[in-house]
Amino acid sequence: MRVASEQLIAANINAFHDWKTTNIAQQMNDTIALACEQHDVQHTRFEEALQPLAQIREFLSSPQHILGSSKTKHGEIAEQFDVHVPNAWALLQGQPQVATFDSVARTAPTDYIANGIDTQSKFFNSPMQTLNGVLKHFVTYEHDTMRYTIPQDQFDIIEQLRATPNPTATAQTLLQKVAEIEALTGRPFEEVVQRSVSTYDDVQTINAYETVHRHYEQLSEEQTKQLQHIDDTKTKRMHTLEQQLQPSWKEGAKVSAGAFAVSSSITATIRIYKKIKGGTPIHAFTTDDWQEIGLDVIQAGSKSGVTAASIYTLTNVTSLSAPFAGAMTSASFGIARLLTDYKKGETTFDDVLLEGQAICFEAAMTATGATIGQALIPIPILGAIIGSTSAMMVCTFAKEQLHIEDERFEHARLAYMDELQTRVDSAYADIIKRITETFNSYDSLIAAAFDEQSDTTTRAAASITLAEAVGVRNDRIMRNVQQLDDFFTK
């Protein structure tokens, strides 16, 4: 019963290990699959993000269709960048496009719509001219929600001047234009005027293709970062799962606490039930009764907790299988009790060896029974193997705890091992002999069946005997010429 209980704990821990391994393996597979899926999605996003840049190139490829003279074509080119570049970045992030020319006439007061707001692009060669262009357009159309985009280098200059404590006279003239815009629109300057994605030079016809390429490189760099982020996230997750797969004191403590709780609950239930069956109703339990139950519960729970912790440590640290870890734990408890009695003088040396071997033999048998389906053990030497194992276990446990009698236990162990080794050798030799005889018989039959010096009848008979010896079904063996002819003609 004692060994069975510990084997039950071992089986539960083994089941926990299997569940944890399977669960974590599944999470690892899911993590890898998710990373692959995210890679595919990101590659698709990148391909979509390149389409707006392709539209800019297509627009630039027909300069004769761009409005204005050679000196003013940059105005419509700037619009293309302010629409398509933000769209490309939005698509790379998996978001919808943010700007469009749809429903906007090419020469209308509105150049394009960005984030649902009518937008006009103003690209002149100086900040003053650009701000004058903004003022003129607003006075003409009085579009209260209109937003204007200006070259980013000019926008940065204006922002720097606005932050300057003592601006120059020229700067004050420019800032006066900013104040006029705010007064006319009734809105802050930064709400009315936005920073373009391009500088004034970027959108000149001689620079436009190079500008497109620069945006392509920036998108490519961001794509690389996104893919690296996916890989880093996967690597971090895999590392975490690998750490979870490793044994830990915290997990061992949980296993031990679980065994303590379960064993304590079962023991308490059994003890209370026995007392009730014995005629004592629960309301009549005395203090002594409860103390007795409590002591039994603590002892049983503690033993189960220690057993669980021992088995968990053995299976994770020493890589023993759970059944054998349970056997080792069970045997160690039994031998510890015997050695305690021996130290007290309540048992003899021979009894320690005999009873210890019985305890270890029981544990070894239980462990073997639990794992017999996992290994092919030759039945003739099974008893000798278990016997040698149990003898080794009892002497090893005893030596570890009775150091003063090391030599005595060593002699006892060697005596047991010599005796059992002789039996193992004998059984092994018998197996080898039977295997050798069988193969010699096969060799003789094969030689006779394929001997070219023999006549056909002799070789046919030898072939039939060989087929029967190796287990060929009777209806598959051709025993005469007629059967041979039927085989080839049917």
Image: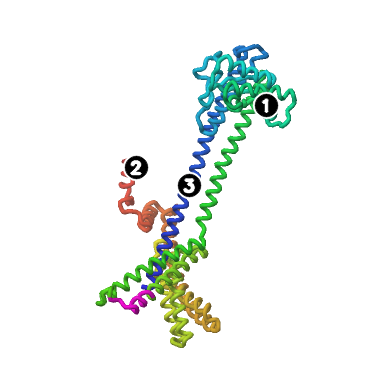
Badge 2 or badge 3: first in the primary sequence: 3
Disc 3 to disc 1, how far (Cα)?
55 Å
Give the image location of residue 220, x and y in percent: 60, 33
Q: How far separated are the C-alphas under marks 2 and 1?
A: 100 Å
Labelled pair 2, 3 in contact (Cβ < 8 Å):
no
Numbered badge on residue 29? 3
Closer to the camera in the image, 450 or 210? 210
Secondary structure, mark 1, is helix
Residue 302 is left or right of residue 288, and the answer is right
- Is any atom of residue 368 visible in this view? no
Tell me if residue 292 is in the magenta stretch. Answer: yes
Please name which of the two marks, 2 or 1, marks the residue nearer to the observer: 1
Quarter of the image holding residue 176? top right
Amino acid beneath label 2: Phe
The crowd level at tag 2 (other Cα within 10 Å; few <14, some 14-19, many 20+) is few
Is 436 included in the stretch rendered in magenta? Answer: no
- Residue 389 horizontal/vertical position (percent): 46, 73
Q: Which mark is residue 488?
A: 2
Q: What residue type is disc 1 on?
A: Ile
Location of residue 226 by image quarter = top right
Dot 3: element? helix
The circle drawn on residue 211 is none
Q: Secondary structure at mark 2?
A: helix
Report the magenta residues as a range.
284-294
Residue kind at label 3, given as amino acid type: Asn
Tell which tag, 3 or 1, sits nearer the viewer: 1
Q: Mark 1 Cα within 10 Å, few/some/many (few <14, many 20+)?
A: some
Please indicate whether residue 330 sits to the left or right of residue 88 in the image: left
User: Pointer 1: what residue?
Assistant: 158
